[in-house]
Image: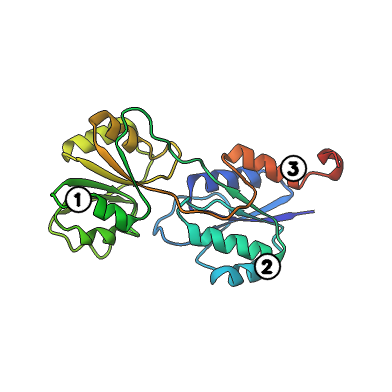
Amino acid sequence: MTHRILILGGTTEARQLAGRLARRADFSVTLSLAGRTESPAAQGVPVRVGGFGGADGLAAYLHADKIDLLIDATHPYAARISANAAEAAKQAGVPILALRRPGWEPVDGDRWTLVDSVAEAARALGTAPRRVFLAIGRQEASAFEAAPQHRYLIRSVDPVEPKLAVPDAHYLLARGPFPEADERALLESHGIDAVVSKNSGGEATYGKIAAARAHGVEVVMVRRPVLPDVPSAETVDALAAKVDHLFAPVAERGV
């Protein structure tokens, strides 16, 4: 029997999980990408690109494609997608699991200012001009047009279009991981005195946090949104084990 699994992805862990599950001959794995990244990394499994039309559309897809398991492995800040996934799974009567990487925690030497939104982060930078490293991607960068007094270094995978309506902005196209040594050099070369970041968690983009600590630079950290309460795991290995257990023969589950 073949078990059909749909993974809502867009993260490195989603790609790793898809590859891990695809090794099983009895799994048919499809990875869904929202399409926000113009040139996504190769995924290694069949990929579906684009939205579903909200929770109702996703529920219809789960039913029509006879999906046996939905896995939410989206970015920690993709709150709307996660909410739609939980609701769609409920409507379609399909089990759901979530991959929820733990967030970063401040340590000695960190100078974090915690905020609840990107707009609040722009206000938290203050009125005096600063040299700011925006490491939040391109989707919400326009919020900083409300604080045009600062000089911005903006890093994203895809170009920020349209460019920000601010007097001084430098754009850097790059895809992680970003080692700490490189991040230290970046902060130093641009004279950065504030970093704006989301609490993405994981190691791939932690370098900027460690670099800011080393240089005594403030980090304006956007807190994570509240996500639906569904069965979850923090690592690819742990979630893969949950999937194996879900589809194990009854005798192997000890039932």
State the residue at coordinates (59%, 71%): 57
Q: Gap between marks 1 and 3, in whole Å?
A: 51 Å
Evaluate if marks 3 and 2 touch, with contact meaning CB atoms under 8 Å apart. Answer: no
Residue 16, image x and y in percent?
A: 55, 43
Residue 85, image x and y in percent?
A: 59, 61
Mark 1 crowd level (few <14, some 14–19, many ≥20, 10 Å Cα): few
Name the quarter where the C terminus is drawn: top right
Q: Residue 126, which numbered label?
A: 1
Closer to the eye: label 1 or 3:
1
Kind of element beneath mark 3: helix
Q: Tell me which numbered mark, 1 or 3, is placed earlier along the sequence.
A: 1
State the residue at coordinates (33%, 36%): 209
Give the image quarter of residue 158. Answer: bottom left
Closer to the eye: label 3 or 2:
2
Q: Residue 110, which numbered label?
A: none
Question: Which residue position holds label 2?
Answer: 91
